[in-house]
Image (tube, rainbow, N blue to C red):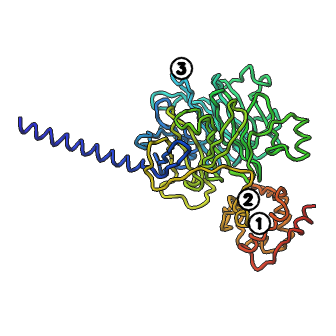
Amino acid sequence: MKLYGIILLFLTGTALLSCTSEKKEIEQFRKAEINIRLEQSILEVSTIAEGLNVPWEILWGSDDMLWITEQHGDISKINPSTGEKKRILTIPEVWKNRTTGLLGMVIHPDIKSNPYVFVDYTVKRGKKIVSKLVRYTLLRDTLISPKVLLVIPGSSGHNGSRLAISPKGKLLWATGDAQKGNKAQNIKSLNGKILRLNIDGSVPEDNPVRNSYVWAKGFRNMQGLTFSNRGYLYTSEHGDALEDEVNLILKGDNYGWPDIEGIHDTEEEKIYALRKTTKEPLLSWTPTIAPAGIAFYGNSAIPEWQNSLILSTLKGRSLRVLKLNQEGDKITDDNIFLENEFGRLRSVCMSPDGEIYVSTSNRDWNPYSQPAANDDRILRIKRVSEIKSDKVITGKKATANTGIDNAEQLYAVYCGSCHKNDGSGIPGTFPALKGSALVSGKGADLIKIFLNGKKTPDKTEQMPGFKFLNDDEGAAILNYIRKNFGDKVGPIQASEIKKYRR
């Protein structure tokens, strides 16, 4: 009996040591990296999963697991308590190139009665690129019986691709203009639209136009889609050189692209808006911030953020908290958190108890710098009772005054995301400014391209024009470029830019 007791003690002791060791390892893995101090609340930011390959979509499943898509074609589940990742599907036909790949995903909220998971991704056959919307059936931990609901023209960029299920059980698909802006206003095209489908892929009878999937039109490249607790639908959208947007989407409305960007603030835009009855965004940003995933936060767990849109940004490398009015049809406050703390932020979702999960996007096609060793990651933000991190931060209010007061900042916000802060660009996509003959050549040639942009045949990424900047701002940027990346060239005067602007 004594021997049995010794053996039992040894075995259970070993098991307890093993469990304790594992618990410590998990706690160390999930330790607070940053604390955020709000008016009343303290928040904790920690990493719950790492080493991911561009997690484009993250969702909270009814199984209390995080569901993710990785851009190369995998769908996985992650245990938010342990970080353990389980791949449940690889889609071999996914074509990943720059912004293409396995993108949006949504799980039907009534998964027991409608055991469906919807995804969309890009496929390339020869020179033809398409975006496919596919419904899978969930059987235990397996996705089976893929059913293609819709196929639309795609491109190497501007594919949009967020998905959502409405309170009425309809499937919403935010599509991009596939780099052909005229499609956004063409009611016969399904690009640059919010599409609304029944879950079997058919057209709902109450759509604005009979036998058409189009719910709303006039979009460039939407990157976020979410419903509020009132049933309002919001999107986040990339502008061109200016006017990134958040929109409130209403049935049958026109949001203006490509004829209008953002707020209706030019005479041409005001005339067009009256003629076409277009809608203005709830909020727009110039300089652009590259808004990505968006989610409505209706939970009281973080009272300061209740009734807000939580927005992740790529170029802005921050999390924005957009406070809504009580009705939900206006944004009353724009607050910035985690700026430059974790790099590019791609997707965001909520758990039922009010925790916020955010994915980084530092291994995508357009990183600002070398990814961290543990990128890409999923971060968790939750309310805690005490500060445990050595780093404590607060948010800051966004203002109309961008705070740009020198040439280096002007270059960084308008040129750095493409041409990089060191002027190196991205080979084959964004030309290097360092050592460029154009930069070191005649000032007139550089001014013309800066003002009017440049379209290059067979290049999907085109340079926008910067006419919206004033002459002094333009001169500051161009002289910064010539001084840092050129070869002994003289300054450009604001008067020269004024001359070519005419």
Q: Which mark is residue 46?
A: none
Considering the numbered disc 3 on the image, is that residue within a helix, a strand or a loop? Answer: loop
Above or below 403: residue 162: above
Instruction: Name which of mark 3 and mark 2 comes first in the sequence.
Output: 3
Q: Is residue 397 above or below residue 256?
A: below
Number of numbered discs visible in the structure rendering: 3
Q: Secondary structure at mark 1?
A: helix
The spot of residue 7 in percent (x, y) is 12, 40
Mark 2 residue crowding within 10 angstroms, few (<14) / some (14–19) / many (20+): some
The amino acid beneath tag 3 is Ser
Give the residue at mark 2: 414
Return the x and y of residue 341 as percentages of the image width and height: 55, 55
Instruction: Give the numbered dot on residue 113.
Output: 3
Q: Residues within 10 Å of mark 1 (few under 14, many from 20)?
A: many
Residue identified by numbered label 1:
477
Nearer the viewer's eye, disc 1 or disc 3?
A: 1
- The CA distance from mark 1 to mark 2 is 9 Å
For the C terminus, the image quarter is bottom right
Residue 288 location, x and y as percent? 72, 52
Please state which amino acid type lies under the numbered disc 1.
Ile
Q: Are marks 1 and 2 in contact (CB under 8 Å)?
A: yes
Front residue of 181 and 73: 181
Location of residue 437 by image quarter: bottom right
Give the CA separation, mark 1 to mark 3.
Answer: 58 Å
> Residue shown at 7%/39% (left/top)?
3
Q: Give the residue drawn at x 52%, y 42%.
A: 41
Of pointers 1 and 3, the one earlier in the residue sequence: 3
Q: Is residue 170 above or below residue 471?
A: above
Quarter of the image holding residue 368? bottom right
- Picture layout, residue 89 above or below residue 458: above
